[in-house]
Amino acid sequence: MRCPYCSSLENKVVDSRMGKEGESIRRRRECLKCEGRFTTYERVEEVLPLVIKKDGRREPFDRLKILHGLKKACEKRPVGVEAIETTVADIEKSLQDKGLKEIPSTIIGEEVMDHLHLLDEVAYVRFASVYRSFKDINEFMTELKDILSSKELKALKEKA
């Protein structure tokens, strides 16, 4: 591990702790050259599928793209960063569980939409308006009507 202060490769681990939920290890390190201290995080590198874009290109899965999209959709909404992080982790795990080597971006988009629908309806509509690229107001209204009807159905089930 390269020291962020002097770029030396010589350092020692001063302290190791399990990260939240046991998914990572936090290591406190000390550079043997400049004695600067810094923190590193280790987590298992999971093999994620290649993403097949709409134009046929393939690129590595990037969880930061999903995180950025969710943050944008949830901007100025009462959704905490922790809820967004958990959602990204759930989506990532769901994609890994599929066991595919390549996955179309449309499946990822639908997975994000499913999770957003449960997280925040306004954020869901924001994301859907960009993801589904509605051609006109009628398509947008159809999506809103679907949300309202599913909400009403859910309320009826809770009363019963």
Image: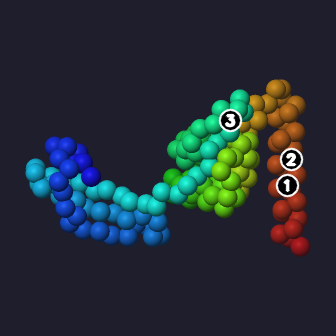
Query: Hey, what amino acid is under mark 1?
Result: Ser
Three-letter code for the amino acid on which mark 3 is drawn: Lys
Residues tagged 2 and 1 counted as in contact (Cβ below 8 A): yes
Q: Position of residue 117 (x, y in %)?
A: 73, 52
- Which element is circle 1 on? helix
Report the residue marked by disc 2. Answer: 146
For the residues labelled 2 and 1, the Cα–Cα distance comes to 6 Å
Residue bearing the label numbered 1: 150
* Label 3–label 2 contact, CB within 8 A: no
What's the mark number on residue 53? Answer: 3
Residue 19 appears left or right of 92: left
| Cα–Cα gap, marks 3 and 2 | 27 Å
Is residue 122 in sight in this rendering? no
Q: Give the mark nearest the N terminus, 3 or 2.
A: 3
Q: Please name the residue shown 22% across and 59% down the image.
A: 29
Residue 8 point in image, percent of width and height? 17, 47
Which element type, helix, strand or loop, lies under badge 2? helix
| Residue type pointed to by label 2 | Asp
Image position of 46 with respect to 147: above or below: below
| Mark 1 nearby-residue class (10 Å; few <14, some 14–19, many ≥20) | few
Q: Nearer the viewer, mark 3 or mark 2?
A: 3
| Residue at the extreme bottom of the image, as rendered | 160
Q: Nearer the viewer, residue 128 or 49?
A: 49
Residue at image position (88%, 31%) is: 138
